[in-house]
Image (spheres, helix red, strand yellow):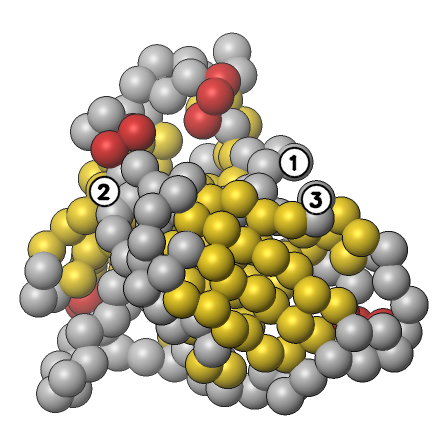
Amino acid sequence: DIQMTQSPFSLSASVGDRVTIFCRSSQTISRSLNWFQQKPGKAPKLLIFAASNLESGVPSRFSGSGSGTDFTLTVNSLQPEDFATYFCQQAFTSPFTFGPGTRVD
Amino acid sequence: QVQLQESGPRLVKPSQTLSLTCSVSGYSMNSRVSGHDPHWTWFRQAPGKGPEWIGFLSSSGGPSYNPSLQSRATISVTPSKNQFSLEMTSVTVADTAVYYCARGNAYWGPGILVTVSS
């Protein structure tokens, strides 16, 4: 299985901050990388697919980049509703594994 | 707007079979749109952990399952009821989790907590 790691495990931020989250895969996955946001008691919400494509309805302050094994999710000007846990997921090959998550509070 | 809703028993005894149903609205599972092949997917998330992909069923490629489940999971589709289902046999306490159904990665149900306990 492809192992996904994320850093940091958690971070403290304030409204208006620029936040960057890192995701690394144990083998190359081209650009087959999704980012999800999850709030307590809710289902994960797809933010970005194929490394850098914004899902419909997701604010443009979210952006993704990377290819191969290293990826980033950036939130420009953090808003109150962005405090959540963020997961990356590789969509390159089955089983489609997730990272452990990064909590933003 | 596509919506999904999980249903089924919330408490299952060890060694028994977990059975969940996902009801889909806002999209006909009977529809055949050229180039569109939705993946009817199940995920789960144990308390305090990241999500885990269980598997999916698509009309073009058939089923695909997470090998870690050791062939215990089966996903089936009932287009006439606009539903799809998950069966997982021989459950243990390690299968306690919130189970989510989804269409691909973009549309998820709210999830259902299933506890495995005697």
Q: Is residue B41 in sight in this rendering?
A: no
Q: Foreground: A105 or A23?
A: A23
Q: Given contact means CB atoms under 8 Å apart, are the residues at marks 3 and 1 in contact?
A: no
Chain containing the residue with disc 3: A
Total count of labels: 3
Front residue of B97 and A4? A4
Whether residue A31 can be seen here: yes
Between marks 3 and 1, how big is the CA–CA gap? 13 Å
Give the answer, above or below, for where A21 lies relative to B111: below
| Lateral position of residue B79 relative to residue B17, left or right | left
Q: Residue at x 59, y 37 (%)?
A: B49
**Alpha-carbon span between mark 3 and mark 2:** 29 Å
Specify the subunit that label 1 lies on.
B
Mark 1 neighbour density, 10 Å: few (under 14) some (14–19) many (20 or more) = few
Q: Which residue is mark 1?
A: B48
**SS at circle 3:** loop
Kind of residue sitting beneath label 3: Phe
Say which label, 1 or 2, has the lower sequence index. Answer: 1
Q: In the image, A54: left or right of A9? A: left
Q: Is residue A40 above or below residue B36?
A: above
Identify which amino acid the numbered label 2 is placed on: Tyr
Of tags 3 and 1, which is closer to the observer?
A: 3
Residue A21 in percent (x, y) is at 65, 60
Q: Mark 2 = which residue?
A: B65
Q: Which residue is mark 3?
A: A9
Q: Residue at x 15, y 50 (%)?
A: B63
Q: Are marks 3 and 1 on the same chain?
A: no
Residue at horizontal 38%, vertical 72%?
Answer: A50
**Amino acid beneath label 1:** Gly
